[in-house]
Amino acid sequence: MTLSRQLPALLAALLLNRYAAFLVGMLLYSLLMKSLGGLGGYSILSEYFEIGLNLYLYYFFNRILRPSRWQALLAAMPILLAYLGQDIYYLMYGKVFRIIELNLVPELLAILTPVYMALFIVVAVLPLAAFLYSINYRKYSAIITGVLPLLLLGSLAEFFPHAYASTFEKVGNEIVFWSDGVSVENNGHFTMLLYREAERKIANLKTELFRNRPVYDETVRQRANWIKSQAADRNVHLVVMESLLDPTLMRGAKFSSSPIHPSYRKLFGNKLGYSISPVFGGKTSQAEFEVLCGVPAFEELAGVEFNAFTGSPAYCLPGLLELAGYRSIASNAYKPNFYNTIPAYKGMGFGETYFPREYAGNADSDTYISTGDTTGEKYMFDGTLFKQNLDFVANILKDDSAKPLFNYVLAIYGHMPHVTNTRKRPPVLKLLGRFQDPQLEREANQFFYRTQAIAEYVNNLVKIDRNSLIILVSDHVPPLQFGPNTYKKLRYLDNREHSINYNRIMIIQDGVVKKLATIHHYDIPKLVLNYITHGSYCQGVSCGFPGQQAPVVDRVAPHDQYMNLMAHATE
């Protein structure tokens, strides 16, 4: 009998074996995700540990489930959902998921719209509930003996991270340090989850080498005293804006009219710059961390650095300025429990923190912020926040004896899914062309009204506080409907390297709009300190950005500074 005649029979036999069918199904799933721009891999010939772990999990789940016609499919469900969750995260945010980021799930769920929440329930919650319902909980010995090897494997990564990491590096496939995605493709989803967790534990242990509170405090005090001796008590206004994507940077996109408000164009003209964010699509607090602390967000101690802060003094820019005689104020337009914000702001050194009274309740009864009417929009409009902040600042400036001001503002309006109350802000444009991304069209319409609010805010701020530094920067660009694929299809910044990390930055110095060469978010504290010291700061410290022709890509040099800061932030 020829091979061609044997092939159908062999395929039938293969599919009748649930374990072989499981591997084929996972391989096909991997190929599908790769074609969609997700994580690929899943090679039976090279990913020995991943395949072995998947087969063990599949065997274990089959063993503890009650027999039924759906048993083979139900046993694969938790594995498939674990893969799917990681792949969706990668598709939407361009980053590989890590175990520590499980603590972000409540925040992610809190921002889901009813439609997305319903989809999450159908795709994830109900299948997982069906799996849990089908477990035969009377099989005590099978459950316990099956869980023990998994606990042992996890414990090795958690409690013996050095041994786990060094062993894996010797026997596993190549770990590409410049690409998490390639490392996952080389080694597998679950395998790299454990390896990255071991790396995080190693980083935590390393912070002990940097922890010396008396020396750290004295070093910060000396810095603050020097800044105070050089400063001319000029105010600083720093605004981080949620997902302020400039649609005109989508070189392949066409709109029925300009998404830029005329007042914004008149104010900034061609003097809009770029700042490189550590994140794409989400994790605003990572951008905040870099903007306020002046070091890259390496994510070595936590998936989000904010979550590692305990409130212990870390003396980021706000704390340094407080010691130098400034009044450091944070005004956040969203919820105080989002991304551990209260301990993080405290550890960074803010003397005062304000949230909308609708979110803060009794915890912040003296706040000056109110969300106003958010009917049909979920998030507080930028213009509403800016008007209240202007009034707040104006009252402070009435006191001639007041301390110089560091006024930090976090706006939230541009958050996904870009829902707009069209009665308040009617659509002004449509996205034209064959490629359609509904989120982009909504974002572009929001951008029109947001740029109007920015121009009004800056013009009024200059009127009441001309001799000051004003910086507005986008935290990150939004994921839109199709994640990085939309940006590639529509040629965001002509698809230059790392284009999706480029964000608009606006700088107004003493009432004059300034444009710098491209910087990183973690360069912003240098801009502030150099301004208030009349240029003395960058004479003593190599700031790197004045006259810079290209973005600095070396994020390794400030690693010790990051570890030193985080060692004291996590005390």
Image: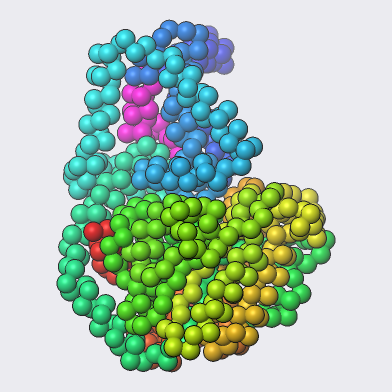
Visible residue check, residue 212: yes
Q: Is residue 544 magenta?
A: no
Relative placement, left or right, of 559 versus 527 is left
Tally of numbered tags = 0
Relative placement, left or right, of 529 versus 151 is right
Residue 192, x across and y down, in percent: 35, 42
Highlighted range, magenta: 39-59
Q: Is residue 50 magenta?
A: yes
Looking at the picture, tell me which residue is in the foreground, 431 or 512: 512
Residue 229 falls in image quadrant: bottom left
Residue 304, x across and y down, in percent: 40, 54
Tell me what residue is drawn at x 45 percent, y 58 percent: 364
Looking at the picture, tell me which residue is in the foreground, 501 or 352: 352
Q: Quadrant of the C terminus?
A: bottom left
Looking at the picture, tell me which residue is in the foreground, 430 or 63: 430
Tell me what residue is drawn at x 74 percent, y 71 percent: 261
Vertical order, 88 against 127 (above or below): below
Tell me what residue is drawn at x 33 percent, y 55 percent: 308
Which colouring convention does the figure follow? rainbow
Vertical order, 116 against 375 (above or below): above
Residue 112, x across and y down, in percent: 57, 42
Visible residue check, residue 251: no
Vertical order, 74 against 255 (above or below): above
Tell me what residue is drawn at x 45 percent, y 53 percent: 362
Query: Which residue is most to the right?
Result: 256
Vertical order, 173 against 412 (above or below): above
